[in-house]
Image: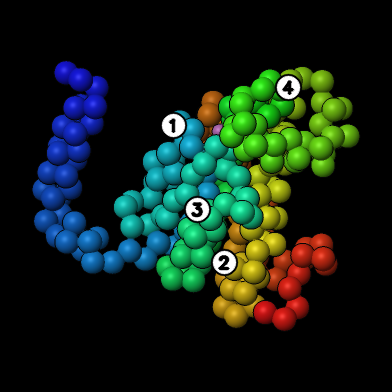
Amino acid sequence: MKPYKKLLLENKAWAQEMVAHDPDYFKRLAELQSPEFLWIGCSDSRVPADKITGTQPGEIFVHRNIANLVIHTDVNLLSVLDYAVNYLKVNHVIVCGHYGCGGVKAAMTNHDYNHLLNMWLRNIKDVYRLYEDELNNIADEEERTNRLVELNVKEQVMKLAKTSIIQRAWKNEKRPVLHGWVYGLKDGIINNLFDMPPGSAMNAIYKFDDL
Ligand code: CO
């Protein structure tokens, strides 16, 4: 059997199983989604947002890209953020990186990945530069990579807080809480790095005072 055909067969089996348990399952889901969470994670196939958090269809709104980056010119990510915050009214936005991230590893090399990937990975190199002193002091390469994974998540959460989308929701609706998480490929456990509740302090230059 061709590998992709297995996916379609599995899909049929899954749909039948869901209906067997709950005849109205799809009918109910088709009418409404009101997820509590927006997940911004890495595209890595080993980090499926719903599986590792035990969330069901309808519970988590997902955006994934290489190394879970929040880039202020990324129309895709910003549209997802805008929709999740202002229409779905999510109460939590989670940036979840993962230890051993291939994107972070690639950014730590000096290899030419050609134009597009170089451009994407440069955002991680910028994080490296910000924390160069700390990172250069870590002798073990795996440890250094994993620390950059954490710092990268922290910077991406900070980038969320810099948007008027988040600052306006914080001001008017006291939500969402921003979360920085890192998933461990080796043990399946999520490390809760830090939270940014509405109104959290940030560098003054990024704060809008006339929202
Ligand atoms: Co990754």
Asked if 26 appears above or below 66 in the picture, the reply is below
Callout 2 crowding tier (Cα within 10 Å): few <14, some 14–19, many ≥20: many
For disc 4, the marked residue is: 110
Disc 2 residue type (three-letter): Pro
- Location of residue 204 with respect to 14 vertically, above or below: below
- Depth check, mark 1 against mark 4: the one in front is 4
Counting from the top left corner in percent of width and height, residue 46 is at 45, 31
The residue at label 1 has a CB less than 8 Å from ligand 1: no
Where, quadrant-wise, is the N terminus in this rendering? top left
> Which residue matches tag 3?
76
Q: Name the residue under label 2.
A: 176
Q: Earlier in the sequence, mark 4 or mark 2?
A: 4
For residue 49, side relative to residue 173 (left or right) = left
Alpha-carbon span between mark 3 and mark 2:
20 Å
Marks 4, 2: nearer the viewer: 4
- In screen coordinates, is 73 left or right of 60? right
Q: What residue type is labelled 1?
A: Ser
Residue at point 84%, 35% (across, down): 132
Q: Quadrant of residue 148?
A: top right
> Cα distance, mark 1 to mark 4?
25 Å
